[in-house]
Amino acid sequence: MRLCLLQLTGVLDDCFCDVESIDVFNNFKIYPRIKKLTERDYFRYYRVNLKRPCPFWSDDGHCAIKDCHVEPCPESKIPVGIKSGNYNKYSQAANSVSDRSECEQADDLGAINSTLSNQSKEAFVDWARHDDAQDHFCELDDETSPDADYVDLLLNPERFTGYRGASAWRVWNSIYEENCFKPRSVYRPLNPLAPSRGLCLEKRVFYRLISGLHSSINIHLCAEYLLDEGWGRSVWGPNVQEFRRRFDTAETKGEGTRRLKNLYFLYLMELRALYKVAPYFERAFINLYTGNSREDGDTKELLLQIFNEIKAFPMHFDEKSMFAGNKLEAKTLKEEFRLHFKNISRIMDCVGCSKCRLWGKLQTQGLGTALKILFSEKEIQNLPERSPSKGFQLTRQEIVALLNGFGVVSFRC
């Protein structure tokens, strides 16, 4: 599938970057590292609720196709540090290695360290509650819900399962027709990813991000397509014909090129968010905690290597041009932007295929986290060096979604 993408060339609209530069940077600097990072324990386990009802229309029922099934990870397989709660990554005591039983460690990890100051304890509580006043762009799953499960992303890869038809069409139709900024003259059934001429930069960016996300999902489904179900064993592989149907210039009357360029635009936006959030992770007390001190140290070192590579990239997207006009109008537009995207995150609970729902929720949350970062620049700049901040926090769920979501996009660029 990468060979098909190599035919794409030229400068991207709304930013000062070209496709060729992104390809070289991603393929040699970023993708090998991000792939290795997402295979580590901290990033491979994602807690998600796949049983939430669709909030917008009567549920059609879950897909009966066997390959749509998601296998939850048994609690016994989850690293103790991940099970114990988000705030433990801040506790130096929690990172010490001992020979105590897993149950004893879990008991200690289930409470806030008694050696911490009252101020730090309050920060932990605030972080665990994940203050509703923050700029949330996604409808977050309640990780304490009995319906929430840990999923091993490596054992449940994104791929085409056979899920298609009216149910899938309704999801994307709702996203484009009801929740996406676009000119009134654009009707999705006639031209699903038409250029959004006449829109302001902010609305144009929103539309391109959703188009890029859609393209990203479609490319991966083409790359991991269900080719054969014979003899009780499913076989996946590239489906070039399906890829051409969706993206070939001739078959799409030129729309395929625009769709692929929107994918690159999405890549640049998420890359910029990682650049902006680097100071959050570079603080010494931030640990990607699983309970294995050596594994945790190696994971953070690899993440910092990725940040260093990103800092060296010379052609970042400039988000400062967004929401830069009249303050009142900018504030109103930003809130509209946020609510539109939050609604799209809720639509992911309407996806009938469990595996498609899993990856749709993860990638949407990853992009929503990236947007939250880009719109929290001042809060990130004012982060205290040695303690948590009430102004800006990321849950483990957001961190896992952010890096895995970017990893999925970087695979396709």
Image: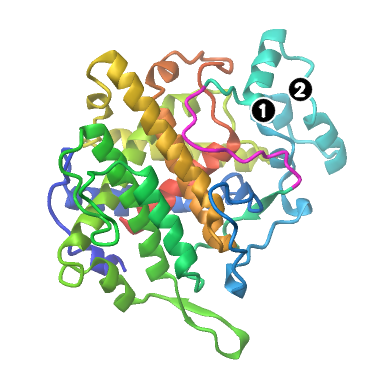
Q: Is residue 398 above or below residue 384?
A: below
Q: Residue at x 48, y 16 (%)?
A: 383
What residue type is disc 2 on?
Ile
Where is the N terminus found, in terms of image quarters? bottom left
Q: Say left or right for 293 vs 251.
A: right
Q: Is residue 139 magenta?
A: yes
- Dividing the picture into quadrants, the one containing residue 124 is top right
Which residue is drawn at the image coordinates 54% and 23% (left, top)?
A: 284
Alpha carbons under labels 1 and 2: distance apart: 8 Å
Q: Are marks 1 and 2 in contact (CB under 8 Å)?
A: yes
Whether residue 32 is visible here, answered yes or no, is no
Q: Is residue 144 magenta?
A: yes
Residue 72 in the image: x percent, y percent? 69, 58
Question: What span is colored magenta in the figure?
Answer: 134-146
Q: Secondary structure at mark 2?
A: loop
Image quarter of the C terminus: bottom left
Crowdedness of circle 1 by 10 Å Cα count: few (<14), some, many (20+)?
Answer: many
- State whether residue 261 appears in this view: yes
Q: Name the residue carrying label 1.
A: 87
Image point (58%, 15%), residue name? 387
What x and y, as percent, mark residue 339?
43, 33
Left or right of 336? Residue 148 is right
Which kind of residue does numbered mark 1 sit on? Tyr
Q: Quadrant of residue 268?
A: top left
**Residue that protrudes farthest toward the top in the picture:** 118
User: At 30% from the left edge and 78% from the top edge, which residue is drawn?
Assistant: 241
**Residue 112 tag number:** 2
Instruction: Give whichever of 355, 28 is nearer the camera.
Output: 355
